[in-house]
Image (cartoon, rainbow, N blue to C red):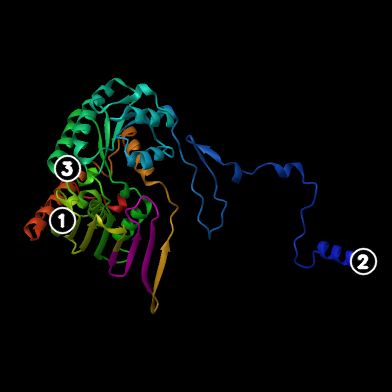
Amino acid sequence: MSDSSSTRFSNRLSNTGPGTPAGPTLPVAAENLDPKSIDVGGVEQGKVSFENWKGEADRPEPEPPVILPPEKRLGIAVIGLGRLTLNQILPAFRQSLHARPVALVSGRPEKARVVAKQYGIEESSIYGYDEIERMAENKEIDAVYVVTPNGRHRDHVLAAAKAGKHVLCEKPMANNSAEAREMVDACKQAGVKLMIAYRCQYELFNVEAARLTQSGELGRPRIIHATNTQVHGSGEQWRIRAALSGGGALPDIGLYCLNGVRTMLGEDPIEVYAQIVNPEGDARYAEVEETISFTLRFPSGVIANCVTSYGAHECKDMEIRLEKGWVSLENAFAYAGQRMYVAQRHGSGEQVNEIRISPKNQFTLEIDHFADGVLSNKTFHTPGEEGVQDHLLMEAIYRSAREGLPVKIDHDSAHKPLPASQR
């Protein structure tokens, strides 16, 4: 390269020109290195907060979470170490603000010891299923999370209540409404709280969909479609054994449709109509149903069409049709992957917007709601009565399928869904 070429190249690099920002002037004054209040934040009532640094066009950052010290978090014993516990629930505790796992209950001591080591739980805090009442002696345990097959929920909840421990119980609550009522009564008599783990009621997209549906922004809701399907494999898994499951696709995955529709509307149905279809000659469905479709009619005039199956490719979606638009919630009942779309008139056309919400672990949100309710003596969004009501409705759905006729529901329900405005 010639000297002239080198000079021209150098000039191009150094030429700022009109409107071109100059580089920083060095050295920087020492006082300019001091952090400003917008970056340092402040402390008020034991909470750290920051001023929003973003412009109005962007979403503000969330405030730092208020995390309880480990010794003040609710100590929970997890009963049952199956797939749901190991894949979802125990990992969710790592993000919890108010709770921590302190004990395990399992019928497999070797597996329990492996899991206990992973989560820093002492071997002395491992119990067998016949030792739940002995947890009364362990003051580190404040509550239990029952994650066993449906047919065992009643016995485990009753034992925990007798031990004086608060209870978070997986859905469906039991095998039938009689067992569910017994669980509610036992917890009341023991003076402990009972919550049912309807995780979707704490999942943020579901919460927003319920708020929007009940807000009137899109007019009155008229029709809902809810689908929850998956393909069941071979083998004698507990879900196809009636004594352990209380039914087939309906209580296992169809319950999400039933409870989800009730939650979206904040009301209970006054009539149900259902049909069951089982594949001929399939031994897996000798005791329970493979596919069930049910229609719910509500006092407001809304019709909800729900379908659930163990024989159809995975779909977990909900659509809400309202007077002035519609709401589509993809993966409404899934553990993750929710997407929400809202449509309404835009001039002479239709505008479809995707609602984006920063995702949070729905199991963590559910656990923290339970822990906060116990620690602060608050009422749960999904108490035991919610589980009882769903069992009463499922029993009406099964009756309709047997009789081939619509079944009317007593409108004086045991527990009405909490309105979105109070969630």
Mark 2 neighbour class, 10 Å CA radius: few under 14, some 14 to 19, many 20 or more:
few
Query: Which three-letter amino acid code belongs to the residue tagged 3?
Result: Asn
Q: Which residue is mark 1?
A: 281
The dot on residue 377 is none
Query: Which three-letter amino acid code belongs to the residue tagged 1?
Result: Gly
In the displayed structure, does residue 296 sit left or right of residue 227?
A: left
Q: Residue at x 14, y 43 (%)?
A: 177
Quadrant in which the N terminus appears: bottom right
Mark 1 neighbour class, 10 Å CA radius: few under 14, some 14 to 19, many 20 or more:
few
Mark 3–mark 2 distance (CA, rounded to whole Å):
89 Å
At mark 3, the secondary structure is: loop
The dot on residue 2 is 2
Q: Residue 37 lies in what quarter of the image? A: top right
Q: Which residue is mark 3?
A: 175
Q: Is residue 322 magenta?
A: yes
Mark 1–mark 3 distance (CA, rounded to whole Å):
26 Å
The residue at the far right in this view is 3
Single out the mark in the foreground, 1 or 3: 1
Query: Which three-letter amino acid code belongs to the residue tagged 2?
Result: Ser
